[in-house]
């Protein structure tokens, strides 16, 4: 099948284009000339009216004189005079300013035939005569009121004899008229002068208008003659162009047939040798007879006769993929579909297919389908389908992506490790190892009753939540994500009506994943230690190393104890130990909540060793809880006339008499007691009747209930209702107490009393 090559039809295209352009020019000229004829008709009508106006002016003046002599009313005759004078004056003004005339609808038309010197001279003479006429008209048109005395009606005057001249009439009126007042006598005098001047002026003005109309008619006749000549010329040239087109087409017809035959052969050669699968689909989704030979190799078949698109894919793709392919192809057949937009959502750009293997089983390949709409005579006739086997590309891309993800994960982990103080990281790894081993022990505990299964879930939840909280505070995102996924599985188990031992098997897999990931962290830490030793050896043998990154790692590994300043020099951050952990946690959670917060810690470096892990877990949870639930957004704080940055204070101190006191306080919105009751009822923790009986202290205590949370959705920072329950359990295990104070819109304050360290160890 040949494709149209417009280059071969360049001559025909140019000839037809020339014919169309020439025809358009002739039509444009005809249109312009026709417009001129219409304008000339308007001009002739206008000049005829203009020619009649002076006579009307004169007749109206005579009529006014007659009525004045008879003592009759002057109103309608005066109005006729005024209209005729105004109409003629406006028309003459238009003619004087460039040959402008008006049609019946008031549209202005310019007549070029009235812009000649001869026409201008006629118009000028008419304007001169009219200027004198206007001078006589002015006192008459300015007259108002009644010309007769008010005391008595005017006496009738006999009409003049037939054939009497206007001047004689006017004179007779003066000699034997009715009684007139002063204004009437002035009007009578003005009318005499007007009629004397108009007797000859109106004929002169009418004659000039007639001569102008004659000039317009002559111009129209000349234009008609020119137009006939143009039309005859256009017809002759059009016939010549049509003849040239016909001869050119006849001359090239045989050549085009030969070219078409050669194109068919070339198309066949292309389809035999192209490496892509090419075929056409009709509206019934049948494959066309013309297709590339590559299809045989791609689809591992030789027979494509009367094959449909469904039959082509049915045996090599799942039913879901086949249905998607049908829907997408049907969408492409829509007449008003946006092809570019639809191609961007092509679900078949990377399709997994399976071919039977002669040795048994199947081979997996990936095919890429591309669809282009083919239109014939302005309507959609076929879809051109291009198929490529992209298996190698897909496999290579996946291998590269896996490699990049692993490398990126290791790099991210390394960067996070370099931002964590060595002692803090070591403590986290040790504590996490203890927690996960505790989880492993809990999983191994035998259980048969429902209550025992629930207790196992609660115990595992506390340990995993502690690992998640500390990893979040340290910014170890990969550890936090795995712990969060562990919590997701635990939450799903909590929601089941009944439990069995087999339900805990998925937890073993997730626990193993957490163990392995923490082992990677330890391994990376070990490599950093090895790098430190290598740097030390190099310095000993060759002098100081110049590598900045190596120096940073060396400085990081050398950072022990209270070397906060040294770590700050490496990472550009301040703080160390638990204080820095809480500051980082608050900053990260505040950023995720679009809030601003400042943390002030006091006395955390004096936490006794037996309390170290518990205080860390408690403060991490309380700081997160304060940022998520307590501190308001900057806009809310501004509306409440607070600083846009919330303040969070964490203080640990020894009590005067016995034990220790941990205080966590924020200057946020405080506990919203009504909201706490509402959520508690929604989650089934209490009934509506019980909620109505709770006092403020009892209401605040609800936040320590398992499963309680005012968060709208579950995130890595809030929503499960496990955090405050964990605080309660940790404090109880140490033999301590929790106090809570809050003022709406002002602050929330958690005060935790812990016994002396020796008693805490015994209690634990």
Image (cartoon, grey):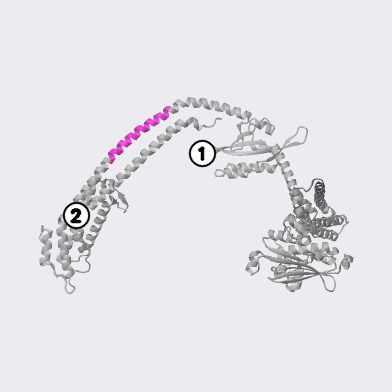
Q: Mark 2 points at which residue?
A: 129
Quarter of the image containing the C terminus? bottom right
Circle 1 SS class: loop
Magenta region: 223-247
Q: Which residue is drawn at 73% across and 41% down?
A: 399
Kindly report the distance in space between the C-alpha atoms of the residues bearing marks 2 and 1: 69 Å
Q: Is residue 628 left or right of residue 731?
A: left
The chief SS type of the magenta part is helix
* Residue 245 position (above or below residue 209): above
Residue 729 in view of the camera: no
Which label is found at residue 74? none
Count of labels in the image: 2
Determine which residue is flagged by label 1: 378
Across and down, in percent, residue 30 comes to: 34, 40
Q: Which of marks 2 and 1 is in front?
A: 2
On whether residue 700 falls in the magenta region, the answer is no
Image quarter in which the N terminus is found:
top right
Instruction: Out of 39 and 540, give the one closest to the viewer.
Output: 540
- Counting residues from the start of the chain, the first of labels 2 and 1 encountered is 2
Task: Looking at this view, name the residue that lies furthest to the right.
Answer: 762
Image side of residue 279 versus residue 6, left or right: right
* SS at badge 2: helix
Residue 632 locus on image (x, y percent):
67, 65
Residue 422 in the image, given as x and y percentages of width and height: 80, 55
The quadrant holding residue 663 is bottom right
Q: In x, y percent, where is residue 381?
A: 55, 37
| Callout 2–callout 1 Cβ contact below 8 Å | no
Can you see residue 465? yes
Judge whether residue 232 is colored magenta: yes
Say which quarter of the image contains residue 653. Answer: bottom right
């Amino acid at each position: 099948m040949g494709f149209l090559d417009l280059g071969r039809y360049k001559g025909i295209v140019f000839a037809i284009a020339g014919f169309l352009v020439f025809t358009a020019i002739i039509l444009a000229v005809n249109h312009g000339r026709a417009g001129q004829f219409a304008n000339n008709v308007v001009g002739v009508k206008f000049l005829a009216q203009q020619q009649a106006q002076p006579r009307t002016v004169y007749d109206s003046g005579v009529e006014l004189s007659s009525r004045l002599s008879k003592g009759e009313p002057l109103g309608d005759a005066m109005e006729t005079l005024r209209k005729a004078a105004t109409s003629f004056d406006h028309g003459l003004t238009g003619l004087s300013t460039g040959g402008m005339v008006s049609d019946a609808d008031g549209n202005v038309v310019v007549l070029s035939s009235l812009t000649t010197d001869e026409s201008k001279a006629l118009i000028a003479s008419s304007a001169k005569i009219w200027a004198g006429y206007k001078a006589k008209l002015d006192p008459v048109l300015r007259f108002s009121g009644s010309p007769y005395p008010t005391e008595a009606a005017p006496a009738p005057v006999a009409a003049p004899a037939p054939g009497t001249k206007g001047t004689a009439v006017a004179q007779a009126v003066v000699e034997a008229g009715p009684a007139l007042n002063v204004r009437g006598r002035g009007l009578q005098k003005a009318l005499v002068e007007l009629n004397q001047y108009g007797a000859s002026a109106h004929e002169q003005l009418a004659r000039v208008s007639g001569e102008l109309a004659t000039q317009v008619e002559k111009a129209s006749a000349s234009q008609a003659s020119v137009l006939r000549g143009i039309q005859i010329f256009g017809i002759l040239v059009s016939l010549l162009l049509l003849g040239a087109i016909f001869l050119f087409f006849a001359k090239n017809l045989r050549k085009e047939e030969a070219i078409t035959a050669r194109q068919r052969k070339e198309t066949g050669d292309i389809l035999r040798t192209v490496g892509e699968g090419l075929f056409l689909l009709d509206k019934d989704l049948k494959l066309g007879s013309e297709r590339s030979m590559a299809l045989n190799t791609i689809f591992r078949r030789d027979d494509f006769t009367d094959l449909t698109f469904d039959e082509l894919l049915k045996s090599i793709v799942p039913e879901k993929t086949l249905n998607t392919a049908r829907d997408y192809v049907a969408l492409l057949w829509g007449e008003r579909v946006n092809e570019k937009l639809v191609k961007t959502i092509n679900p078949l750009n990377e399709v997994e297919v399976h071919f039977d293997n002669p040795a048994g089983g199947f081979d997996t390949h990936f095919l890429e389908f591309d669809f282009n709409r083919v239109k014939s005579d302005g309507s959609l006739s076929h879809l051109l389908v291009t198929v490529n086997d992209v298996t190698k590309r897909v496999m290579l891309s996946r291998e590269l992506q896996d490699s990049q993800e692993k490398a990126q994960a290791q790099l991210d982990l390394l960067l996070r490790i370099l931002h964590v103080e060595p002692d803090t990281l070591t403590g986290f790894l040790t504590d996490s190892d203890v927690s996960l081993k505790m989880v492993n022990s809990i999983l191994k505990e035998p259980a048969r009753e429902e209550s025992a299964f629930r207790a196992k879930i609660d115990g595992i939840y506390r340990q995993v939540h502690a690992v998640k909280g500390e990893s979040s505070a340290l910014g170890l995102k990969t550890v936090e994500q795995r712990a969060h996924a562990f919590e997701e599985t635990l939450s799903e188990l909590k929601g089941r009506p009944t439990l069995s031992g087999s339900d805990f098997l998925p937890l073993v897999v997730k626990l193993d994943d957490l163990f392995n990931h923490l082992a990677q962290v330890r391994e990376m830490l070990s490599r950093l230690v090895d790098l430190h030793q290598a740097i030390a050896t190099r310095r000993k043998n060759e002098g100081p190393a110049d590598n900045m990154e190596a120096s940073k790692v060396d400085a990081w590994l050398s950072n022990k104890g209270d070397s906060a300043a040294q770590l700050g020099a490496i990472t550009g951050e301040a703080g160390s130990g638990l204080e820095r952990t809480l500051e980082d946690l608050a900053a990260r959670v505040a950023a995720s909540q679009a809030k601003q917060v400042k943390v002030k810690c006091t006395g955390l470096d004096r936490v006794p060793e037996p309390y170290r892990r518990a205080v860390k877990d408690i403060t991490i949870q309380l700081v997160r809880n304060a940022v998520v639930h307590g501190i308001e957004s900057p806009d809310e704080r501004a509306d409440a006339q607070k600083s846009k940055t919330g303040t969070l204070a964490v203080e640990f101190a020894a009590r005067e008499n016995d034990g220790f006191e941990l205080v966590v306080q924020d200057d946020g919105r405080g506990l919203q007691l009504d909201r706490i009751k509402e959520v508690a009822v929604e989650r089934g923790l209490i009934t509506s009747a019980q909620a109505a009986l709770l006092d403020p202290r009892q209401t605040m205590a609800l936040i320590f209930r398992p499963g309680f949370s005012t968060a709208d959705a579950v995130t890595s920072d809030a929503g499960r209702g496990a955090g405050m329950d964990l605080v309660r359990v940790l404090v109880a295990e140490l033999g301590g107490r929790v106090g809570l104070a809050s003022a709406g819109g002002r602050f929330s304050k958690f005060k935790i009393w812990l016994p002396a360290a020796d008693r805490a160890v015994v209690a634990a």
